[in-house]
Amino acid sequence: LEQAECFHSYVIKYGFDSNQFIGASLVELYSRCGSLGNASKVFDEISLKDTVVWTSLITGYGIHGKGAKALETFNHMVKSSEVKPNEVTFLSILSACSHSGLIHDGLRIFELMVSDYRLVPN
């Protein structure tokens, strides 16, 4: 975590904090360190969120057993963002639901994936 914070300070110091690719990397980095608060804070500071940024946060919540928070983030992405979830996003949210025992929510998302987004599991 200390190295992640050091890297984040470097990013800010040299003005890369507005770069969405670096932002997504920081979200993933903090998530992998278990620092979901920092991951969420970086996520909130990213002005232009793409699918990778959203998926990074969803994945972080899922990895650390925060299925309800992953689901809340996914629902927020779908309802209030023009960004559409992709195959990786669905894999992340379905995994989060599975590991958190959110079976009915997982089934609903699976149906959404097939019916609304025309993504076929392979």
Image: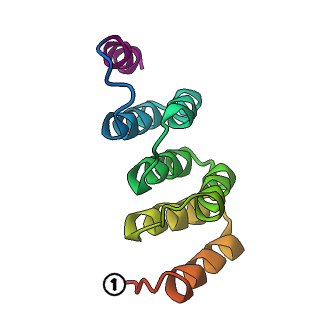
- In the rendered image, residue 36, in percent from the top left (x then y), is placed at 55, 34
Q: Name the residue rendered at 65%, 79% in the picture.
A: 108
- Rendering quarter of residue 30: top left
From this view, report whether residue 116 is shown above or below residue 57. Answer: below
Is residue 56 or residue 104 the one in the foreground?
Answer: 56
From this view, report whether residue 9 is shown above or below residue 17. Answer: above
Is residue 114 or residue 95 the one in the foreground?
Answer: 114
- Rendering quarter of residue 33: top left
Q: Main secondary structure of the magenta part?
A: helix
Local SS, label 1: loop
Residue position marked by numbered label 1 in the rendering: 122
From this view, report whether residue 56 is shown above or below residue 23. Answer: below
Q: Name the residue rendered at 45%, 86% in the picture.
A: 118
Q: Residues in magenta?
A: 1-13
59 is within the stretch colored magenta: no
- In the rendered image, residue 122, in percent from the top left (x then y), is placed at 33, 84
Q: Name the residue rendered at 49%, 81% in the picture.
A: 117
- Rendering quarter of residue 11: top left
Neighbour class for label 1 at 10 Å: few (<14), some, many (≥20)? few
Q: Amino acid at mark 1?
A: Asn
